[in-house]
Amino acid sequence: MHSLTPLFEPRGIIVVGASSSAEKLGAVMAQSLSNYPSPVELVNSRGENGMHTSIAAAATAIPGGPDLAVLCVPAAATAQALRDSAANGAKAALVCAGGFAEAGGPGLELDRDVRAAVQETGIRLLGPNTSGFFVPRLNLRASFVPGVAELEPGSVAVVAASGGVNHVLAFHLQRAGVGVSLAVGIGAGTDITAPDVLDYLISDEQTKAVALHLETVADGPALVDAVARLSAVKPVVALIVGQNDVSEFAQSHTGALATSWRTTRAVLKQAGAVIVDDENQLVAAVTALASRRLAPAPNPGVGLITGQAGPGLLIADALHSAGVTLPRLAQASQDTIGALLPPMTFQANPVDTGRPGPGYDKIVAAVATDPAIDVVAVYGLTEPVADLPASVVASGAAASLPFLIGVDGPDSDVERARKSAELHGLPLITGPTSLAHGIAALVNDARGQFQRAEAAAASFAWPDVQGPWDEDRAKELLGALGIATPARRSCSSRAAAHQALAELGGPVAVKLLDAAVLHKTEIGGVHLGVDSPAALDRALDGLEAAGARDFLIEKMAPSGVDLVAGVRRDPVFGPIVVVGLGGTAAEVYADVSIRSAPLSIREAEGMPAELQARDLLYGFRSGPMLDTAELAAVLVRLGDALGSNDSIAEIEINPLRLTRDGLIALDAVVINVEEDTK
Amino acid sequence: MHSLTPLFEPRGIIVVGASSSAEKLGAVMAQSLSNYPSPVELVNSRGENGMHTSIAAAATAIPGGPDLAVLCVPAAATAQALRDSAANGAKAALVCAGGFAEAGGPGLELDRDVRAAVQETGIRLLGPNTSGFFVPRLNLRASFVPGVAELEPGSVAVVAASGGVNHVLAFHLQRAGVGVSLAVGIGAGTDITAPDVLDYLISDEQTKAVALHLETVADGPALVDAVARLSAVKPVVALIVGQNDVSEFAQSHTGALATSWRTTRAVLKQAGAVIVDDENQLVAAVTALASRRLAPAPNPGVGLITGQAGPGLLIADALHSAGVTLPRLAQASQDTIGALLPPMTFQANPVDTGRPGPGYDKIVAAVATDPAIDVVAVYGLTEPVADLPASVVASGAAASLPFLIGVDGPDSDVERARKSAELHGLPLITGPTSLAHGIAALVNDARGQFQRAEAAAASFAWPDVQGPWDEDRAKELLGALGIATPARRSCSSRAAAHQALAELGGPVAVKLLDAAVLHKTEIGGVHLGVDSPAALDRALDGLEAAGARDFLIEKMAPSGVDLVAGVRRDPVFGPIVVVGLGGTAAEVYADVSIRSAPLSIREAEGMPAELQARDLLYGFRSGPMLDTAELAAVLVRLGDALGSNDSIAEIEINPLRLTRDGLIALDAVVINVEEDTK
């Protein structure tokens, strides 16, 4: 039995702090739980309305004891109520009250008390500071929001950081026609956190897709692990709040510092989640995914059949923006379709059918059986003469391929289409843009599964290179990792420098060499394009004036496109690999791709495609062409290196230049953990 | 009377090509129009079901004659039906059929016929290739989409490029509770185009806000003018399709090349429209704007009051992403609120009220009367005990400030809140992100009005500078426009070049000077950092080898941040001014701000703030600070210059360098109209 089964499928419940005053939380919660078919016993210390006056008495009234204690008592009474509940058989508890760590002051002490009670008793605690959870299928609604009584059973589980968002999503999912299987607001997450619930959902058969809402992440590896295991068996869609600096408000709400938004999105995507930007996209995504996933694939092809060209254009535009491919249909498919439609509409994909008429099912079949098509989107205004879900089924193609149907029309017509879709087991969505978001989620889920299908290489041994990490040693490390660097000489004297120039031939870069200096350029520690002994002397004069005793003489690299690549330890997620374009402009655009390390070659190969400026890397204006596999190898090795040496905090190559001869690391910094925390 | 009054408020209608076969377009259209209270007469050439057999007979049956002819005849019969209708008194016609110009081939001839009929008769034609229009308030539904029968009167006008999108938006607006006042699908736009309908809407009292959907723009200045005049009296929200290359499909649909998406968005924003990204944002925007606009302001402050912190965080995050400001409330406001709420919630803005209780209206009043607040967003889950619209009214603040209310809950509760909002005359929206989009629309509308409040300077005389436009002459022009350039000498001999070096002092740039060479750098025509007579001789050798006879010797500029600024003639919108970051990276990010010229200083001052990389211009890493007014002056003058000289196609400054001493134009190109079209 899962440790959360007593919470989500309790054999009996006690409500502690129940009340007979209708406006009080304890009354609302008791009312909300009153429809639960297993025993629910109420505790009120004053014995109002014949309620039990003690937890022990209430527990005794439940054959086999209570599994779940729902606590509607003030913060100060919570720890004791937890201990009493556990002592009387409760294995799980829900605490809605606020006023613990997030409130600061005396709340910090109350938080410690609660944690101690959990620790001592082993009770699983949801909350504090949440509006609860609900499992409509079981008529279990542990929430003080009255509207939850109207929620019907569905197929999507909601795991929300916030109780409020949990409810918002549940209502929206109900409106979308998919409904919730189980919906939880994590709240403070003192004991039960999102990873715990995700773990529970792995074997929850009613849940076909999971909507995950995150504000902060306390334990990054646990979250990544839970998402990876869950997304292996059912789709997970994640909405991460905090693109902007709303940390003051967020902190008051959650009592935790906001986790890096960009990194969280990247590593959860890598773990197999589909990442969305807002709750509307989240609802569209799980609506599409709860029905049927696509097979893992790097770039699934989408067929779009639309009854109206204008909405079709909106859909196609949104799909392109989402990076989804609408392949041109094969000539044979176009011929079949051409025989069924008047000639004036577009038929190569999207297929513009006009008002669906006889033969519509054959058009659907022609698109679905095209070899380039992996999923079909069908859109149309509702019409009495057209039942889109039925036509899709009539095509015979729905058995072999996932479909997503989009309709718009008056409420009653949309409802009729929804019922038909439900009858035929097909997902249905309203609105062109939402249809596109649903399709994008199906495609991104398939891509995520594909990338995860290849495991990272197993063991990696740190090469025999040690600090102190001046540039020469850092580049020696890169060399040992198989990353190209320019020919160089480390020199301890001016004579050696002249010898190096003679050996390497000009022009060379002449640099200060000192592990203690992280930013050479800023103190005049770099001279470029030195091509004569006289120029070298001038450069060495300058370096010595800047305090240099050792010099690095290095062959100048050919021109190209500068990247930045590195690996560092994220405080939440551990080693992460980052690649982006070089230069201040790229930095301002925050145009980077991020992955958790270790990563597989296939995962690393997906990184450059995520850069907005990726065109610059592939022959822009006759520039050099990136060998994606070569860059992937660099990124994988950087990740492996950090993973294999706990004393290293960060390795950064800046710039990593893309030249006609491939990638070459022009400068590199390695930082020890000690230095980093100074 | 407006020329579209006979179309949208006809005293009588004839339906030509009506049918008694229920599935035919002519039957559906006749059915759809049958509820129109003024006379509707049907024409069927075979006299089915006692219909008139001729247009003349039908027209005679209408006292005063028909204003509108709805044609449900094939493309080939359309021109004649138009002539017959006009001859029998019709002043407007709707043509739904396709098969004209967009179909190519024989359709082109049919298109010419129709245009000739319009020209000869002066009849106003909506279509072809549209599913019609509807005015629910008048029970006028000229559409063959059956669901339009269920559309109720509302306050938003829809002007859509596509008949399909017109219907989609109407159904979504009905669901949003605002409904449509009038909704039109333009279709082919052979006669009546979007600007015509926008012009009609200026005096349409039922219309409080306008939703504009565009695919292509035939007449840019007419559209800009219509949007400017309409947005001066009521808000206009525009959704422009075509961010991505979907031109093959779009062309099949509209028969026209896609207009530049970026430019269209920019110039319509400048004209006063609020620009949105998809139809969901469009619906949220007009829902908010149909109730009440904000006063013109450069940066209105938004107050956010939320019953639940989690959704509040979603809203605040989305508002920040949309560039909307949530000012911190004044201490006095916070004190007032602090006395009304328990201490543990955030109260500085957003104001997290928790479950609304007694004193909620006073909290609303405190936020609304804060001096930094210009509009208030109020959000909460629906609860039987809380009527948000009533509480807002109870605060007494709704009279002095615009509000937007957001709720989520079960359908029935949301419906109850919507009715309350309607009763109290307040706009209401569902979903945190949609609430944020609604607020952003209110703010952007106020910003647009503010920028438009200042007219562009009146007259501008082209300075006394003429081509041929080599770099020296181009910079002379810039100088005459008041734009700084480096000190320079134009030299026709090596001796003059040496003299120039002596006068200017090194280092200098030495460039090939030839109006026929547009890209000097690519042919080795630029030598930088020349600081000695010997280096100058080497540079001149190189230039002569590249074919130079004249040279430009120019003082090297200090380092800084390179911009690109220019003005050119857009094929649709005429002179447009563009500014962006320099370099290939910025080009790949397409990070530019665009305006139609002439433009006011205030409009130009808004441009750098639109750049994603704007941080780079304002002291990034101790770099130079842009004087926004200085850049605005450059951009205004560039626009004025092009506007005052029809022979110039383009002026581009690349780079325009931002230095510690201000902006300086390092290279400039002026292109004549003749050269441009070569």
Image (cartoon, coloured by chain):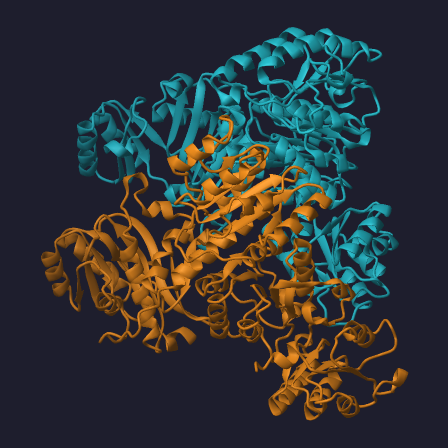
Chain colours: A cyan, B orange
Name above or below for residue B577 compared with residue A193: below
Image quarter of residue A353: bottom right
Q: Position of residue B382 (x, y in %)?
A: 65, 40
Question: Which residue is the extreme one toward the right?
Answer: B49
Image quarter of residue B494: bottom left
Q: Quadrant of the N terminus of chain B?
A: bottom right
Q: Nearer the viewer, residue B211 or A578?
A: B211
Residue A13 visible? The answer is yes
Number of callouts: 0
Q: Position of residue B482 (x, y in %)?
A: 22, 64
Residue for point 49% across, 23% down: A571
Image quarter of residue A39: top right
Q: Nearer the viewer, residue B453 or B105?
A: B453
Q: Quadrant of the C terminus of chain B?
A: bottom left
Looking at the image, residue B34 sits to the left or right of residue A349; the answer is: right
Q: Position of residue A6 (x, y in %)?
A: 76, 18
Name above or below for residue B508 compared with residue B162: above
Q: Nearer the viewer, residue B326 or B604?
A: B326
Name above or below for residue B482 compared with residue B92: above
Residue A562 visible? The answer is no
Q: Position of residue B188 (x, y in %)?
A: 64, 75
